[in-house]
Image (cartoon, rainbow, N blue to C red):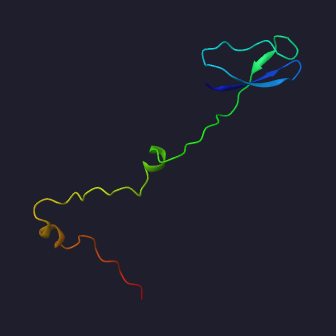
Amino acid sequence: MPIYAYRCVECDFAKDVLQKMSDPVLTDCPACGKSSFQKQLTAAGFQLKGTGWYATDFKGSGSKPAPAASSGSGEAASSAPSAAPAAPTAT
């Protein structure tokens, strides 16, 4: 169950209330009794801990896929010369 923060507009009384999402919104202030008790907008308070998908997936440190040019015997593919030209040396 979520915790909602409420504040009275009239007397500035504030209270955190543990209630179900289906429960009705509180309107009567417990301090002054007026119907000016409003729910406040607050930041979500949760932390992701452990070794879940957010910590382990979609990172570059995972296993590498198999090379695509592995057709036929492994010797023919590994002994082929490189198609990229050599970089010129600085003089």
Q: Quadrant of the N terminus?
A: top right
Towards the viewer: 64 or 2:
2
Towards the viewer: 80 or 86:
80
Towards the viewer: 51 or 64:
51
Residue found at x 70% / y 31%: 42
- Measured as percent of width and height from the top left, residue 20 is found at 62, 19
Residue found at x 69% / y 14%: 25
Question: Is residue 76 toward the left or the right of residue 15 in the image?
Answer: left
Displayed quadrant of residue 15: top right
Q: How many marks?
A: 0
Residue 9, compared with residue 47, is above or below; it is above
Residue found at x 48% / y 49%: 55
Displayed quadrant of residue 33: top right
- Measured as percent of width and height from the top left, residue 61 is found at 41, 58
- Measured as percent of width and height from the top left, residue 60 is found at 42, 56
Residue found at x 55% / y 43%: 48
